[in-house]
Image: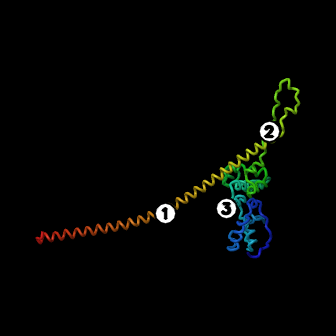
Amino acid sequence: MNARLNPPAYELHPLCVLFPRMVGAEFDALCDDIEANGLRTPIVLHEGMILDGGNRYRACLEAGVEPQFVEFAGGNLATFVLSVNLHRRHLSPGQQAAIVASAQDWSSAQTVGKPKSGNVAGLATVAQRAAESGASERTQRMADKVAKADPALAVQVGHGEVSLPQAHAMVSEPAKPKKPKKPKLPASQSEAPAAAIAEDPRDAQIKALTAQSEDLEKALKEELAENTRIGAVLDADDRVAEAMAVNKELAAENKRLKAQIGQLTERINGLVGESTQQVRRIKAMQAKMKKAGLE
């Protein structure tokens, strides 16, 4: 690689930070591409921070290629960042839902005490956020809850450091056990010590942990079902592609057979014509022989 550059450092915009950074082989491949082909997509700046292109900026410095910058053209910040990053990266539905939820919370915070600037357009409802993330509404609600309860934890989910079901279980308070009613004792036992009939506090802790474990198991099953559904869609796409390839082969074969049929038809028509001419010659010869008295 070329000598590394040392231009002024740029901070990442809070919306840019929501996405995981490239590492390992993926980042090395980006560096190699930029070194070989240059930076094809400029880095977008907003208010002196990198709004889009944090990985490209690092790769330029690593490859010794001068980075190119453009200023954000204006519009909805969250919508722009989500549109150019959310679906070009290999992220799970839980990661995508968490990133959208975090973007919504950041956008909402920008309007507190101020007139709305348009930062929250298109992300106001669960349905809109689920449509943006591509996750189910159930998954999106889980992500929304994590983002509101613990924004830093939501960022970890978006980075793939914690799964969404785990994070959801972490921010979900275990159900408080109901205070048991004192049983009515026979008169002969009415003077028993209170400690003898009080519920063991460890039982309440066990119940709370059991409920939390059941919630986590349910959330994990739902996440698995969502991933299975997406896998089925991808398999269906593969089958459609295979069917299209088969149809192309059949169309080519049909075209070849039609050409052969056309050639045979022309040949048959030629033979019929020759046969007709031969019949006419025979009839003419018979007429001449009859006239000459040879028959």
The three-letter amino acid code for the residue at tag 2 is: Pro
Disc ID at residue 249: 1
On screen, residue 188 above or below 216? above
Asked whether disc 2 touches disc 3, contact meaning CB atoms under 8 Å apart, the reply is no
Gap in Å between the C-alphas at discs 1 and 3? 32 Å
The three-letter amino acid code for the residue at tag 3 is: Arg
Q: Residue at x 77, y 46 (%)?
A: 172
Q: Where does the C terminus fall, quadrant-wise?
A: bottom left
Horizontal side of 247 relative to 263 (left or right) equals right
Mark 1 neighbour density, 10 Å: few (under 14) some (14–19) many (20 or more): few
The residue under label 3 is 88
The residue under label 2 is 177
Mark 2 element type: loop
| Residue that extends furthest to the bottom in the rendered view of this protein | 2
Label count reads 3
Q: Position of residue 139 (x, y in %)?
A: 69, 50
The three-letter amino acid code for the residue at tag 1 is: Glu
Q: Position of residue 160 (x, y in %)?
A: 73, 57
Gap in Å between the C-alphas at discs 2 and 3? 46 Å
Mark 3 element type: loop
Q: How is the image coloured?
A: rainbow
Residue 111 occupies which quadrant of the picture? bottom right
